[in-house]
Every structure is written in C-alpha cells, then in structure tokens.
Amino acid sequence: MKHATAATLDRLEPLLESIRGIGGLKEKSRGCFYRGSKSFLHFHEDPEGLFADVREWDDFRRLPVNTAPQREALISMVQSLLEIK
C-alpha cells in the first residue's frame, strides 16, 4: 500500500481541512500530521480504496476513508485521541 499521491490528497482536501481545524496537530507535509514529535496521521491508497493510518497508543490503526461516514468516524477518533493526554 503506497502513501497517498497529491491527486489523492486533492480528493481528500475537505477531510484534510477538517483535520487542520481540530488543533493539537502539526501538518509537516500535506496529509502527514504530527502530534508533538511523533507521526500521528497519514494517508494511503491502494486498489481497495483510501485509508488513514492513525497512531493509537504505540501502533497505527488503519481506517478506510472512502465514504462520508468513514471520514466522520476518522474525525471522531482523532478528536477522542487528542483528548487523551
């Protein structure tokens, strides 16, 4: 599974804008968000669709982000994880 290309990130721009609005994250490169000094969220693409990898504790959890409900679930998860210190 490869990292999302610029064209794919263009398709995800509304989602990226929502993530940028959450706060607590720094976008070091387009679509790659950090929490402090650690990678927190980035995107992948493959023939099965688009996916987000979100750091949940010490590991990444892969979530599909192909539909509006999936994207809303990602936003909710990010907000919840950022509330945990």
Image (spheres, helix red, strand yellow):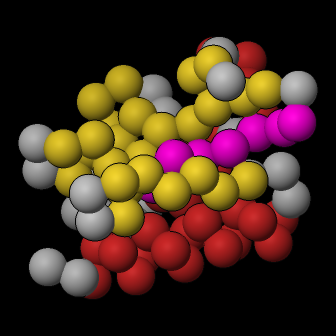
- Give x and y (percent) for residue 49: 84, 38
The segment highlighted magenta reads: 48-54
Identify the residue at image location x=11%, y=42%.
37
Q: Quadrant of residue 3?
A: top right
Judge whether residue 53 is colored magenta: yes
- Give x and y (percent) for residue 70: 76, 65
Identify the residue at image location x=55%, y=78%.
76
In front here: 16 or 47? 47
Judge whether residue 72 is colored magenta: no
Q: Quadrant of the C terminus?
A: bottom left
Identify the residue at image location x=28%, y=65%.
57
In front here: 13 or 49? 49
Q: Quadrant of the N terminus?
A: top right
* In this picture, residue 53 sits left or right of residue 12: left
Identify the residue at image location x=42%, y=51%.
60
- Give x and y (percent) for residue 11: 77, 34
* In this picture, residue 66 sits left or right of residue 56: right
* In this picture, residue 32 sits left or right of residue 64: left
* In this picture, residue 40 sits left or right of residue 47: left
Q: Quadrant of residue 45?
A: top right
- Give x and y (percent) for residue 63: 65, 56
Q: Is residue 1 visible?
A: yes
